[in-house]
Image: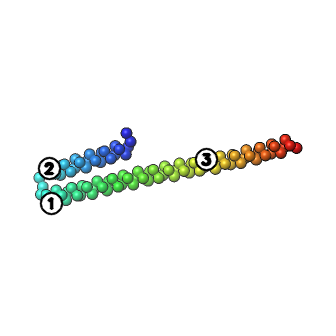
C-alpha cells in the first residue's frame, strides 16, 4: 500500500470523525456549522500542505534522476569519442 493512500485514508478518517463528533455535540446549528467549516478549512490546508510536500519531493527526485541520466549520457559520449579516436588511430597504423 502506498504512503499516499495511507495518508489520504488517515486524513479522511479524521475528517469523518471530526464531523460526526461536531454533529452530535449539543450546540446551536449556527455554531455547529461554523465548527464544521473551520475543521473543513483546517483539513483542506493540511491536504494542500501534504500535496505540496509530495509534489516538491517528486520534483526533486525527477531533477536528480534527470541530472544523473545527463551525466551518464555525457560520460558515454566521451567514451564513445575516445573509442572512435582509438579505432581511427588503429586503422591508420594498420594501413601504414
Q: How many marks?
A: 3
Q: Which of marks 3 and 2 precedes in the sequence? A: 2
Please tell me the numbered disc located at residue 24.
2
Q: Which residue is mark 3?
A: 72
The colour scheme used to paint the residues is rainbow
In this rendering, position of residue 70 left or right of residue 18: right
In this view, 2 is above or below 29? above
Please tell me the numbered disc located at residue 39.
none
* Residue sitting at x 44%, y 53%: 56
* Residue sitting at x 11%, y 52%: 26
- Few, some or many residues within 10 Å of mark 1 (<14, 14–19, 20+): few
Q: Which of marks 1 and 2 precedes in the sequence? A: 2
Q: Which of marks 3 and 1 precedes in the sequence? A: 1
In this rendering, position of residue 24 left or right of residue 40: left
Where is residue 22 shown, x and y percent of the image?
Answer: 17, 52
Please tell me whether mark 2 sits on a helix, a strand or a loop: loop
In this rendering, position of residue 81 left or right of residue 15: right
Quadrant for the N terminus in the image: top left
* Residue sitting at x 67%, y 48%: 77
Please tell me whether mark 3 sits on a helix, a strand or a loop: helix
Please tell me whether mark 1 sits on a helix, a strand or a loop: helix
Q: Which residue is mark 1?
A: 30
- Few, some or many residues within 10 Å of mark 2 (<14, 14–19, 20+): few
- Few, some or many residues within 10 Å of mark 3 (<14, 14–19, 20+): few
CA separation in Å, label 2 and label 1? 14 Å
CA separation in Å, label 2 and label 3? 61 Å
| Camera-nearest residue between 56 and 81 | 81
Amino acid at each position: 500500500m502506498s504512503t499516499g493512500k495511507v495518508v489520504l485514508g488517515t486524513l479522511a478518517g479524521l475528517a469523518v470523525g471530526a464531523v460526526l463528533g461536531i454533529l452530535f455535540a449539543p450546540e446551536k446549528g449556527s455554531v455547529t456549522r461554523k465548527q464544521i467549516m473551520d475543521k473543513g478549512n483546517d483539513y483542506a490546508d493540511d491536504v494542500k500542505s501534504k500535496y505540496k510536500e509530495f509534489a516538491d519531493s517528486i520534483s526533486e527526485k525527477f531533477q536528480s534522476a534527470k541530472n544523473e541520466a545527463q551525466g551518464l549520457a555525457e560520460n558515454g559520449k566521451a567514451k564513445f569519442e575516445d573509442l572512435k579516436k582509438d579505432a581511427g588511430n588503429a586503422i591508420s597504423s594498420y594501413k601504414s
